[in-house]
Image (tube, coloured by chain):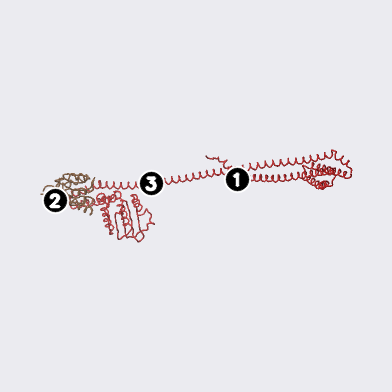
Chain colours: A red, B brown
Amino acid sequence: MMLSLPGWRSRLSYHLAGPLAVLLAVAVLAINEAGYRADADLVARRDAAVETRLTVGRARRMVLLMESAQRGYMLSGKADYRVPYDEARAQTDQVLQSLRALAERAPTHRQNLLLLIDATQKRVSELAEVVRLFEANERDRALALMLTDIGREQMERINELVEEVVRKEEAASGSAGRQRERVRIWTVLALVGLVLLCLGAAFTAMRLNRERDRERAGHVQDLQAERDKLEHEVARRTQDLSALAQHLQTVREDERRRLARELHDELGGLLTAAKLDVARVRKRLQEAGPEVLERIRHLGETLDAGIALKRRIIEDLSPSSLANLGLQRTLEIQCAEFSQRAEVPVEASIADVGLTDERELAIYRFVQEALTNVAKYARAKRVQVSLQPDGDHVSVQVRDDGVGFDPSQARNGAHGLAGMEFRVQSCGGQWLVQSAPGQGTLVQARLPA
Amino acid sequence: MSRLTVFVVEDSATIRQNLVATLEEMAPVQVVGYADDADGAIAHIAHDPPPCDLVILDVLLRRGSGVDVLKALRFRAHRPRCVVLTNYATRLIREHCLALGADRVFDKSAEVERLLEYCEALARERP
């Protein structure tokens, strides 16, 4: 269930959401305020309506009281009955005043109220007139006046007017009430609208957030995938380079072996045959002159030199004794020959360990390189070479007490160290060099057996 | 003086031919056979009675080594004399071969004459 908003719409809703919300909140507040005002208005209206009714009702009551008191008085002739009449009449001014005040306050009823005032005044004066006549012993005239319709008409008029005012007032109240109801409905609608908008906005925001999170997660994943790919690539390249270096090394060794073999087979054969020929010729030439013998002798020497040279080259290229005599003997020979050439005592402590051809060659070359370095740089007085088993590994060490060097300074390319290191590591071994200026040198290799 | 019968173990044809010619010319030697690898040599030689008086062994062979032949012959009851004729006659190789029962070790280039003398001496010992 994806809420996917196309670009411009989502941007639009993102930007409008805020102002819209603010606008709607203000609208709700305004409507609320209007409602409150209408409420207050209605309450005031109601109060005014009640007061109006009371006022006009009071007027009517006063007149009615006066009327009935007057009738009673006239019927009984007793002074007791005059009291209510007087009391009622005493209120006349007050009543009229309140009516006038109401007329000022309520313009809608003004006309009616003025008529009411007029009618009330007339009625009151008519009633008073009857009483006056009655008390002046002019009963007949009083009665005649009373029996005219004037009084009744006036009373009716008053009633009508009062009813009118009351009815109008109620109508106004009703309409105010309905208006208030309308305002309330609007308020509710606006509130609901606001709530819906807020919910909608929250919903949208949630969706957008989730989408953004998803996007971000996607980015992170992409980056990780990219990084993994690069790491993989790097690992592959490293492996390729390693394999290439290994291959080159193997190729070199193979080539050396081949050269050695060819030198030995072809050249060696030729030289040896030549020497044998010399031996045979020499025997035959016993009777020849000293010059010839000298030539033959010199020829023999030349051949010897050639053979010696060939041997040195072959041994350098591919140590034959490794295959024939094994590593222990070969290393012992190597140490002995080095000791003789460099005129430095060599303590060799070589154990008889069985290894693959490749590892034996690696160790041989390791010692060869190390001894070459000793001869070239160390100016040592003593050299120790050892090959010992070490758990399921073998350890070969070449130690000298010469001038030493600073391993961190020497670039790995120097002194054939890089070659040694690579050769050892490509056999799955560990390589170690310890040296300091003036403190001799130790190179060590530890290979799996 | 009867000729000394010799078996040559040498993988280089050039050297072998030359050696055979030299031996037969310059010493009372008859070369009765040759082999160019250790197994072939052992197959020929390890018989009772041995087919020759002397075996001349090169160390580096096409397959195997002269040392293997020495080892194979070492404890046989009837074994011919064995000498090593090699290009790698270092002190330790000499010691090694002598320890394995070789009678002599000769350097192929420098000590051929000594080999010839040895063959002569051996032939003189024979009845």
Q: Is residue A1 left or right of residue A152?
A: left
Can the viewer see residue B14 in this picture? no
Q: Is residue A141 left or right of residue B12?
A: right
Looking at the image, is A119 positioned above or below residue B101? above
Q: Nearer the viewer, residue A372 or A358?
A: A358
| Number of other residues with Cα within 10 Å of mark 2, as a class: few under 14, some 14 to 19, many 20 or more | some
Q: Distance from label 2 to label 3 (Cα)?
A: 63 Å
Q: Which residue is mark 3?
A: A239
Q: Nearer the viewer, residue A241 or A427?
A: A427
Which element is circle 1 on? helix
Image location (x, y in percent) of residue B8: 18, 46
Q: Earlier in the sequence, mark 1 or mark 3?
A: 1
Which element is circle 3 on? helix
- The amino acid type, in three-letter code, at marker 2 is Leu
Dot 3: chain letter: A
Q: Which residue is mark 1?
A: A18
* Residues at marks 2 and 3 on the same chain: no
Looking at the image, is A342 positioned above or below residue A134? below
Residue at 70% in and 42% down: A177
Image location (x, y in percent) of residue B109: 21, 50
- The amino acid type, in three-letter code, at marker 1 is Gly
Q: Which residue is mark 2?
A: B122
- The amino acid type, in three-letter code, at marker 3 is Gln
The answer to whether marks 1 and 2 mark residues whose Cβ atoms lie closer than 8 Å is no
Residue at 11% in and 49% down: B126
Can the viewer see residue A173 in this picture? yes
